[in-house]
Image: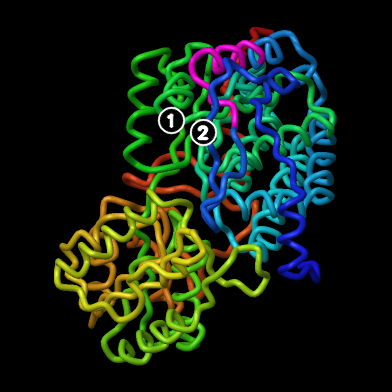
Amino acid sequence: MLETTHDTWLRRAGELAHPVHHHIDGAAEPGGGATFTVVSPRDGSTLAEVADGGAAEVDLAVAAARRAFDQGPWLRMAPADRGRVLLRLAELVDACRERLALTVSLEMGKPITDAYAVELRAVAATFRWYGQVADKLADTSPHTGPDSLALVTREPAGVVGAVVPWNFPLTLASWKVAPALAAGCAVVLKPSESAPLSALVLAELAQEAGLPPGVLNVVCGDGPSAGRALGLHPGVDVLAFTGSTEVGRHFLRYAADSNLKRVWLELGGKSPNIILPDAPDLERAAATAAWGVFFNQGEMCTAPSRLLVHSSVAEHVVDAVVERARTLRVGDPLDPATEMGPLVGEDHLRRVLARVAAGSEDGARLRAGGARTLTGTGGSFLEPTVFDRVDPASRLAREEVFGPVLSVFVFDEPDEAVALANATDYGLAAGVWTSDLSTAHRMSRALRAGTVWVNCYEEGDLSVPFGGMKQSGNGRDKSVHAWEKYTELKTTWVRL
């Protein structure tokens, strides 16, 4: 992180100019003239009036993407040349890191330290990784008899619609855009209406990096208008979505009602974090449990929002987590010392507070937090919140909160912990803390989750896939498996 003070970030925020128009066919597109307001959750101030897109703007963007795919140079470039453009984009993201981090911090409340050191590092790394592997994802030639030749090729799927949320507005966009571009596809990206500004800056950088017009388009707007139009559009071949399970169902219906486009979904989570008494370092396990659920204000689908701790160490671990919740520094996201910023907006804060109230109504014991804080700032701040004595059948135990709210459960046997962990509609991630290798493997296999971290949480790199089971979705982001989502398999059989 650069040595930049709170005052410096405040000054730069005042000087920042935001793009406010859609990015279509390589240029800013004002659309039909309608706008929506982007409000900063740090103080309730207006950041920008952004072009509000719907079916007409989606039509323009899909048409541009279709021309770029069917007639333009991107698909016809050598994979190595496409890779060089993505590598150049990674360099530009690094060069523009401060501006992008500041934009993310302002539009969704992420602490500037995390925006700069975590999110923007991940974005540059994603474009760099896919740029490096673009020419190394080889086709295959199956072994056949002497009188024939079989070729199995992966070809770009076509036009990709990507709809991403506000909690990691650039990271999650890059996880979809980078592999789709590496495969040779053209993309129409719809960012969240809560955090569209950073995606518009990314589109400008992609143009500067050498991406041909129409290959990456950004349409701003809400889900019922722009999102629905993209999901229903017959010119879209693949739709990739990260967001809530409820909205994911809509995209499946849109596909069924239109052209049966493939739909890849990364949806909600209610991730368990299991601490056994033989955890190699209980202090680190407790500190990681607190960090995981409060990082990014708990606005993470993988947040370990259910802490399952063995009865013999429960008091020690939970006390440590509660103490961390009480001492965590909540404040202005532009202050480098802030550890937790505001929730994304007032509507979301009200939803999270309703979940907190429901937890108390259902009999859980509130150990820390639970109330709005820093009310004089005009921002959407919530105290880090911890409940224990949570009923496994309660709403707090089963429903995604998407905020800095931890539910604690106590168990006596590993099998009991696994059953409790799996007692949810979700299956995105899980954590296990143990010194016993056999226990780690057995529990990891038994947990119905797309990712299981052992003696850590939220670790990994671009080489491993990310995604969920059950109602946490299908398909995978990151790694070669993400690239495969944006390709079609073709078999060519040649009689010799």
Label 2 is placed on what type of residue? Val
> Whole-percent x and y of residue 222?
46, 31
> Whole-percent x and y of residue 325?
43, 79
| 137 vs 258, nearest the viewer | 258
The residue that disc 1 covers is 223
- On screen, residue 90 above or below 279: above
Q: Is residue 299 visible?
A: yes
Q: Are marks 2 and 1 in contact (CB under 8 Å)?
A: yes
**Viewport quadrant of the N terminus:** bottom right
Q: Which mark is residue 163?
A: 2
| 162 vs 55, nearest the viewer | 55
Query: Which contiguous range is marked in magenta?
Result: 50-64
Residue found 63% across the figure and 28% down from its top = 218
**Viewport quadrant of the C terminus:** top right
Q: Is residue 435 visible?
A: no
* Left or right: where 493 falls relative to 77: left
User: Local crowd at mark 1 within 10 Å, few (<14), some, or many (≥20)?
Assistant: some
